[in-house]
Image: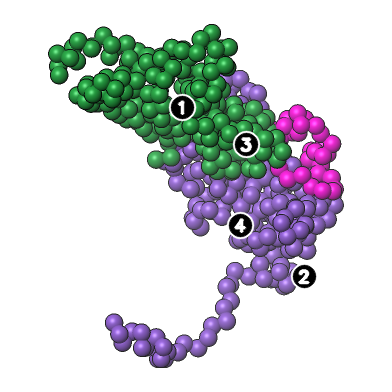
Chain colours: A green, B purple
Amino acid sequence: MFDRLIELWPEIVLALAQTGTMLIVSIPLAILLGTPLGILLYGIGPTGLHHRPRLHRVLDGTVNVIRSFPFLILLIAIIPITRFIVGSSIGTAAVIVPLTINAIPYFARFVEQNLSQLDGGVVEAARSMGASRGQIIRDVLLVEARPALVTSITIMTVSFISYSAMAGLVGGGGIGDFAIRYGYYRYETDIMIAAIVLLVVIVQIVQVSGSRLSRSLDKRL
Amino acid sequence: MIDIQNVSSVFDTPDGQLTAVDDVSLHVPEGSIQGIIGFSGAGKSTLLRTMNLLERPRSGRVIIDGTDLLGLDVHQLRTARHGIGMVFQHFNLLNNLTVQKNVELSLKFAGVGRTERRRAAAEALDIVDLADKAGSYPAQLSGGQKQRVGIARALATQPRVLLCDEPTSAVDPRTTASVLQYLSDVNARLGITLVIVTHEMNVIKAIADNVAVMEDGRVVERFDLTALQNPGFVPATPIGRYLITDDIELDRRPRANTVAPADAARYSRV
């Protein structure tokens, strides 16, 4: 088994790099775009600063629709969009598009939920101090939600490590795809187990560091 | 300083409209301490919240320091609010910010630069004797200390008016005295006009110059606290009379000598 592992090592390294690329691009993009969307969902929602029932319903519905797609189907369904954005429908870059499109509403929901669970008193205090809406979001809501947001990012990253395993379908590679190709298709069970162990280690590292960061940011004691 | 004229505040609820404040007028002279007392649901907090337009009244005028707040646009209102501090029952501090940063927040919203913020916040913390807690987080403080941070935060922008919404209702009696002492000092030393909403008459007696008694959204009675020094003084309304007595009167039934038969049966099985 070890001979085989050593033989496949370059491929494992490549697979790890592919998984890493997918996450390093899609997760920050999801945070960058999902955060404003989540703030908007919260802001125009029933407990928000600027309740807009109709717009909220439309946005809420759109988010639900995207979130309903099984990732495998989304991957295929948006191939034309993928081709338009990255110029190709296969390869690692091509997987990043559906991953990001899936991750944006996923994270937006987290943001919305984390904000709506905050105590309304701090918002009221900020309003009494003459804060603008932007200041309330930046200096109050996002500050108070920070530990919860870090937890959400951690959960999202773990989920998307799992989603990225489906990248093989469009030749995106990655460690999950590696496990499927060698372990499942070629019956090299020990190689599959080795890949899964690697995934378990990665997930553990992400989860432990995420939890630790969240705890250090949380000052509620 | 504060001139409330015929203010009414109405809420839309699932059960129809609720008039929380019903045609209230109230004048608070500059530098005085005005108490507003009443039971839960009397509309006292809503009335207080109209004084910085956290609650927009349906009708009437809210004049603070000569300016009718209802005539201001969003930006002007925000500027006006920098001059009207507010203190809350549950403190409403940010858990994830240090005491120093919490106090700086009001200055930040007022557009004060970083260095000046640091200085003014330290000064405000000094007023409430919490300079040594600047680096602590709210969770590390007692209830009384949290409320003092709340007071410092409200004072940092040097407001002319301080609105206090049940400032001592979440702290124990000894802490109540300390919080009121700081509020009283703030009024005396800085000349800030205070409005204090409470359901505790002893808070009013301790600190206020004048009190307005509210019931069902209306101010039913108001008097000068010096009146209480006259032993013959009797408030005009039943609620006023009720509030100035601290006694809790119960209709106590005679105590039964034996356990009721149903209970006796239950106990015998044990």
Q: Chain of mark 2?
A: B
Between residue B35 and residue B182, name the one nearer to us.
Answer: B35
Residue B211 in which image quadrant: bottom right
Query: Is any atom of residue A71 visible in this view?
Result: yes
Q: Which residue is located at x 57 percent, y 81 percent?
A: B251
- According to the picture, the residue beneath numbered tag 3 turns out to be A61
Location of residue A155 in the rendering, given as x and y in whole percent from the top left corner = 41, 32
Q: Position of residue A150 (x, y in %)?
A: 44, 30
Choose mark 3 or mark 1, whichever is in front.
1
- The dot on residue B203 is 4
Identity of the residue drawn at 73% across and 63% down: B215
Give the amino acid at mark 1: Leu
Q: Is residue A132 left or right of residue A78?
A: right
- Amino acid marked by disc 4: Val
Circles 4 and 3, Cβ within 8 Å, touching? The answer is no
Mark 1 vs mark 2: same chain?
A: no
The kind of residue tagged 2 is Ala
Amino acid type at circle 3 is Gly
Q: Position of residue A38 (x, y in %)?
A: 58, 31
Q: Which residues are magenta?
A: B54-83
Q: Nearer the viewer, mark 1 or mark 2?
A: 1
Mark 4 and mark 3: span between their CA atoms? Answer: 51 Å
Which image quarter holds the C terminus of chain B? Answer: bottom left
Q: Pick the residue in front: B268 or A75.
A: A75
Instruction: Measure how far apart labels 1 and 2 are at the Cα level.
Output: 76 Å
Q: Residue at x 85, y 48 (%)?
A: B60
Q: Is residue B139 above or below residue A106?
A: below
Q: Quarter holding the N terminus of chain B?
A: top right
Picture layout, residue B149 above or below residue B12? above
Q: Residues within 10 Å of mark 4 (few under 14, many from 20)?
A: many
Disc sitting over residue A72 in the figure: 1
Cα separation between marks 2 and 3: 58 Å
